[in-house]
Amino acid sequence: MANLDDEKLINQELFLDNPGRKIISFKDSSWGELILPAPDESTGKAKEGFRILVFASFLLGYLLLETLKELERRNPGKINIVGLVTDDPANLKARISAEKRIWRLFDMKKKVQLERVMIESALAFGIPCFTGDVKTESFRKLLAGCNPQAILVCVFGQILDQPITDYPAFGIYNFHPADLVSHHGAGPKPYEDLIARQAECSKVTVHRVTKEVDAGPVVGQSPPINVRLKNGGITNDVLVINDKMLVPIDRMAACMVSELVCKWDRGESGCLEGLNFEDLFPQEYKDKLMQPIDEDIPQAELPLLDGEVEFVIDPNRMPS
């Protein structure tokens, strides 16, 4: 049985990692808080560049954040991650549809671990982290203070309202692990849909965020991803499928952010209308995605960045 001390445990561990961190609570949010990195964690953080705010959690969101961090490291003055907004599954008051989404598969100990890893990843890089209600005046002020030019979303449990979706000049985009173009897997259980259909393949879809869940205009999709096991069957373990579906997240994010930054460099603004990931991925990588799933048990390790991803932004290599 979970208890309200689980979030306190996360905070205690965060302070043990660095006692200079600061936690701020807001009266108009019934759960969560703003967690600020310690001064020594913020010294090397980018202050200039294209400003990106991240709404993300779980393993897919973790891989997205790690990708953006590497892009910021490799491209000084080009990218500035201004904040992370993440799920708070360790808090019983959090309204994040925890019983309908991926969090329902974990006990509280694992939820605490996954939440802490996500927050730690942000703070250690000098990124502020917010875990509370985004439909509050306090968050509106935080959003204005961050002033993001784009927002990237990946596994986030709150429905975003119009003041958020209309804010960034370059758009707000969600990475969803389902083939939305074929009208499959919208909503909180994309893998269950895939299993029910006994699908052979799926895709990760990037779409613009609107008030309707997973219904915004599609910007692009990954190449097909084989979700079958080596024996040709399909697993009923959604975490095994998740391990395969998260694979292209880093490449897709790197390509997409590169295009956004190049657009900004050219003095343009506005949302991305389309991005052909098929043309941006080498054939050997597309072949890799079509290999069957190797293991029929979930991975125990955090996802690592693909060492072959191009993290240096080169305007000459991106579509104009």
Image (cartoon, rainbow, N blue to C red):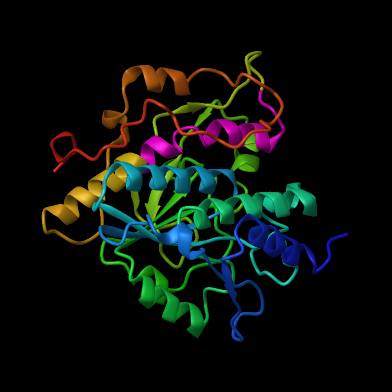
Expressed as whole percent of the image width and height from the top left, the position of residue 96 reads 64, 64
Q: Is residue 221 visible?
A: no
Seen at 29% across and 53% down, the residue is: 79
Seen at 62% across and 14% down, the residue is: 230
Q: In the rendered structure, which segment of residues is drawn in magenta?
A: 234-253
Expressed as whole percent of the image width and height from the top left, the position of residue 43 reads 39, 59
- Find out whether residue 243 is within the magenta segment: yes
Seen at 52% across and 77% down, the residue is: 135
Position of residue 22 in the picture relative to residue 289 (left or right): right
- How many numbered callouts? 0
State whether residue 34 is above or below residue 27.
Answer: above
Position of residue 254 in the picture relative to residue 105 (left or right): left
Q: Is residue 103 visible?
A: yes
Seen at 46% across and 35% down, the residue is: 203
Expressed as whole percent of the image width and height from the top left, the position of residue 314 reads 19, 38
Quadrant assignment for the N terminus: bottom right
